Amino acid sequence: MNKWWLVIIAAFFEVGWATGLKYADSFGTWSLTVIAIVISFWLLVRAATSLPTSTVYAIFVALGTVGTVAVDLLFFLALRLIFGCSSLLLYYSLVLLV
């Protein structure tokens, strides 16, 4: 099995536990969050044993970040995030112009 698949699967679990940290409210959902954390990092460590660690971690974090934002937007309708990102973009644009 290609080790890059482990990174992609680990990122899926990262999306799960990052979402779980925000929305878990019972013992069952917290248990699933902890299980997702363990699986995510276990897969990440397995992939990093034979691939360049810095590249593995960068891809893992990037996929997890994009996935978490996508899940939040698609499933939880976090429109506040869209407006927050657009205001951050405007802020950094103004900073670069000065």
Image (spheres, rainbow, N blue to C red):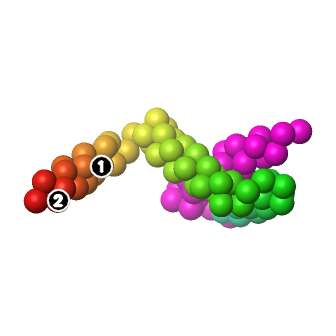
Q: Which residue of the protein is positioned furthest toward the right in this rendering?
A: 1
Q: Which residues are magenta?
A: 1-28
Which quadrant of the view contains residue 17?
bottom right
Q: Kindly tell me whether residue 15 is visible in this rendering.
A: no
Front-most of residues 94 and 86: 94
Looking at the image, residue 39 sits to the left or right of residue 92; the answer is right
Please give the label number shown on residue 11: none
Q: Which residue is at 62% across, 50% downward?
A: 59
Question: Looking at the image, which residue is at 43% across and 40% down?
Answer: 73
Q: Name the disc covering residue 95, or none.
A: 2
For residue 30, what is the image quadrant? bottom right
Q: Nearer the viewer, mark 1 or mark 2?
A: 2
Q: Position of residue 50 (x, y in %)?
A: 84, 55
Picture coordinates of residue 1, whole percent (x, y): 89, 39
Looking at the rendered structure, the number of numbered marks drawn on it comes to 2
Query: Which residue was labeled with disc 1?
Result: 85
* Identity, as a three-letter code, of the amino acid under mark 1: Cys
Residue neighbourhood size for the residue with mark 2, other residues' Cα within 10 Å, grouped as few (<14), some (14–19), many (≥20): few
**x 65%, y 60%: residue:** 54
Q: At which x and y percent is residue 95?
A: 17, 59
In which quarter of the view is residue 96 placed? bottom left
